[in-house]
Image (cartoon, rainbow, N blue to C red):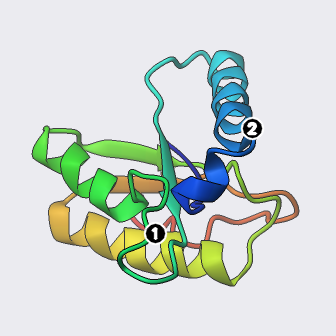
Amino acid sequence: MFTAHSLPLAMARGCKYEAQLEETCRLVGEAVGRSDWSLVYQSRSGPPFQRWLEPDVCEFLKTLSEEGTTDVVVSPVGFISDHLEVLYDLDTEAVRVCDETGLNMKRAATAGTPMQPCDRRG
């Protein structure tokens, strides 16, 4: 699954953000020979009544586990490098969900990061 920063729906409707992300995911999927990918979002903020792009990465991981998925590769395609949001949202929160649900998660490294920080489950 590919992740990108979520945006408020009102903002997303006025730009090509989602379409550009979908195209990026499709191209990367083709390059690695996979068509079974999903685009999910992370780093939602703002007031709870404001709708943002979904699905949320952690909620999607829970759904995958409930559907019987055992392994997942997470690629932060919407981020050019690791920074606080990537490290916290994926390497802390998503790893916690995977630990709780039994999902085996591997995270693709971002540009300039030789190691995968959450790759601790073999």
Q: What's the residue at 46%, 35% (across, down)? A: 38
Residue 76 in view:
no
Above/below status of 6 relative to 72:
below
- The x and y percentages for residue 1 are 48, 42
Q: Position of residue 64 (x, y in %)?
A: 24, 44
Mark closest to the chain's N terminus, 2 or 1: 2
Q: Is residue 103 left or right of residue 113?
A: left
Label of residue 27 in the image: none
Residue labelled with disc 2: 16
Number of numbered discs visible in the structure rendering: 2
Image side of residue 33 versus residue 118, left or right = right
Which of pointers 2 and 1 indicates the residue nearer the eye? 2
The spot of residue 9 in percent (x, y) is: 53, 55
Q: Are marks 2 and 1 in contact (CB under 8 Å)?
A: no
Which SS class for mark 1?
loop
- Within 10 Å of disc 2 (Cα), the crowding (few <14, some 14-19, many 20+) is few
Who is closer to the viewer here, 80 or 99? 80
Quadrant location of the C terminus in the rendered image: bottom left
Foreground residue, 60 or 121?
A: 60
Q: Is residue 72 left or right of residue 101?
A: right
Give the Cα separation between the discs numbered 2 and 1: 36 Å
Disc 2 on helix, strand or loop? loop
Identify the residue at image location x=60%, y=61%. 7
Kind of residue at badge 1: Arg
Along the horizontal axis of the image, is 72 left or right of 45? left
44 lies above or below 31: below
Residue 115 quadrant: bottom right
On residue 120, the disc is: 1
* Residue located at (64% from left, 39% from top): 18
Residue displayed at 72% across by 44% down: 17
* Label 1: few (<14), some (14–19) or many (≥20) C-alpha neighbours in 10 Å: few
Q: Amino acid at mark 2?
A: Lys
